[in-house]
Image (cartoon, helix red, strand yellow):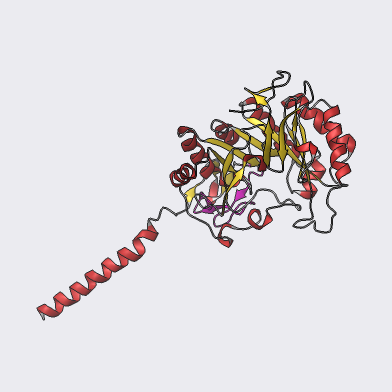
């Protein structure tokens, strides 16, 4: 009987050990959702997210508009922390950043989700998906920094989907990157509240912000967002010393009205400065606007002329290559200071940030 009891005890012990080995790691896994930042706890286990201008009020068990932040028993969690679904090494020109470390390679990451629903989204497969719908690679900020260093790249780009969605992951990674001398850049829709943006800006070197149009009507109809918060984000980034470039995807008949474009360009000049690079990007049929035609080249060229006439010094046309409007011209002598072919630099005529022909200073971060 004693032997049987010992056998039963041994079996129970082995089962317990087996249970611990199999299930304990998942109970305390580092992949457990991370508590979100910038939210308030309300009554009845309801929370209000304060990350973006939507300020979603989220009952227990539900998610916000972005579908990546979930209320669990009165605590808001981010479901995309350390879960990139896309990782690529891109030319910095692809962001696009034309006045920031030309020819640099950017270790680019994205997660699922977005806080806008642009009908023309070029990355809708990831931006309009829930986190559980996509495969990911689990990478902590420390692991990510390690991979960036191993790759030999000097820049991390938070891009493809909306980086605001993975704010906690981006911020913690950016802090570690700054300590390691790695630059941080993002391509964003600018739909973020001022407090979290100011905190992020402490570690951000450059940003390309999508200024999708210049009317509230356009934003409401095609993005389910609002223009005013984006304009505020641009001014905040400027005030915090972050290098800014702007991209406007031009859709014929929607946001290419000459008077509206002039108003937009004058706003950029007056609020951000004439040295702010502006990229007019060509639209191709995508997502929910497959019935539209690609943007005509003459519409893009007209938009560029309007911007230059308004006093902007660096205006580009994107998604058409090769074309002369992807080169950087010296505003002093008019000669090419950076010649590009698509995303690649063919000729660099800068000398310590100045035109080597006439000495004119060219705005940007070059070293």
Residue 227: give x, y in percent of width and height: 75, 39
- In this rendering, the answer to whether 283 lies above or below 193 is below
Nearer to the camera, 74 or 121: 121
- Reply yes or no: does residue 41 show up in magenta: no
- Chief SS of the magenta region: loop
336 vs 146, nearest the viewer: 336
Q: Nearer the viewer, residue 139 or 344?
A: 344
Q: Quadrant of residue 359?
A: top right
Which residue: 76% across, 46% down?
Answer: 319
* Vertical comparison of 362 with 342: above or below: above
Which stretch is magenta? 52-80
Residue drawn at the location 58% of the way across and 28% of the way down: 367
Q: Find the residue positioned furthest to the left.
A: 2
Which quarter of the rendered picture does the N terminus lie within? bottom left
Front residue of 34/312: it is: 312
| Residue 211 seen from this side | no
Figure label count: 0
Question: In the displayed image of the protein, which residue is found farthest to the top?
Answer: 359
On the rendered structure, is 276 left or right of 80? right
Q: Quadrant of residue 163?
A: top right
Q: Decide: is 359 above or below 142.
A: above
Coordinates of residue 242 in the picture (x, y in percent) = 62, 29
Q: Residue at x 46, y 37 (%)?
A: 176
Please state the horizontal and vertical placement of residue 36, each as a whole percent of the image. 52, 45
Report the residue at 10% width, 78% height from top.
2
Res 343 seen here: yes
61 magenta-colored: yes
């Amino acid at each position: 009987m004693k032997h049987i009891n010992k056998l039963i005890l041994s079996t129970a012990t082995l089962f317990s050990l087996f249970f611990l080995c199999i299930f304990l790691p998942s109970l305390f896994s580092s992949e457990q959702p991370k508590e979100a930042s910038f939210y308030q706890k309300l009554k009845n286990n309801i929370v209000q997210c304060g990350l973006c201008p939507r300020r979603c009020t989220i009952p227990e068990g539900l998610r916000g508009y972005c579908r990546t932040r979930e209320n669990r028993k009165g605590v808001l969690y981010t479901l995309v922390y350390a879960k990139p679904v896309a990782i690529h090494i891109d030319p910095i020109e692809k962001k696009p950043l034309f006045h920031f470390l030309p020819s640099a390679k950017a270790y680019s990451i994205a997660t699922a989700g977005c806080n806008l629903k642009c009908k023309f989204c070029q990355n809708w497969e990831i931006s309009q998906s829930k986190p559980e719908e996509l495969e990911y690679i689990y990478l902590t900020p420390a692991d990510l920094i390690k991979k960036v260093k191993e790759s030999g790249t000097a820049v991390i780009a938070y891009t493809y989907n909306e980086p605001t969605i993975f704010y906690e992951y981006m911020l913690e990674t950016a802090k570690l990157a700054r300590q390691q001398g790695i630059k941080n850049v993002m391509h964003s829709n600018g739909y973020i509240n001022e407090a979290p943006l100011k905190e992020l800006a402490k570690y951000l070197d450059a940003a390309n912000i999508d200024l999708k149009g210049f009317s509230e009507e356009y934003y409401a109809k095609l993005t389910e967002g609002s223009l005013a918060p984006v304009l505020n984000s641009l001014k905040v980034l400027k005030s915090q010393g972050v290098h800014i470039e702007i991209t406007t995807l031009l859709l014929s008949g929607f946001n290419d009205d000459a008077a509206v474009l002039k108003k937009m360009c004058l706003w950029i000049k007056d609020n951000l400065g004439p040295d702010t690079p502006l990229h007019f990007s060509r639209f191709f049929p995508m997502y929910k606007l497959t019935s539209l035609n690609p943007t005509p080249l003459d519409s893009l060229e007209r938009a560029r002329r309007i911007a230059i006439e308004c006093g902007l010094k660096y205006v580009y046309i994107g998604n058409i290559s090769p074309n002369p409007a992807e080169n950087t011209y010296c505003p002093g002598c008019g000669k090419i200071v950076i010649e590009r072919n698509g995303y690649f630099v063919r000729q660099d005529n800068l000398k310590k940030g100045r035109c080597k022909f006439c000495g004119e200073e060219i705005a940007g971060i070059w070293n």
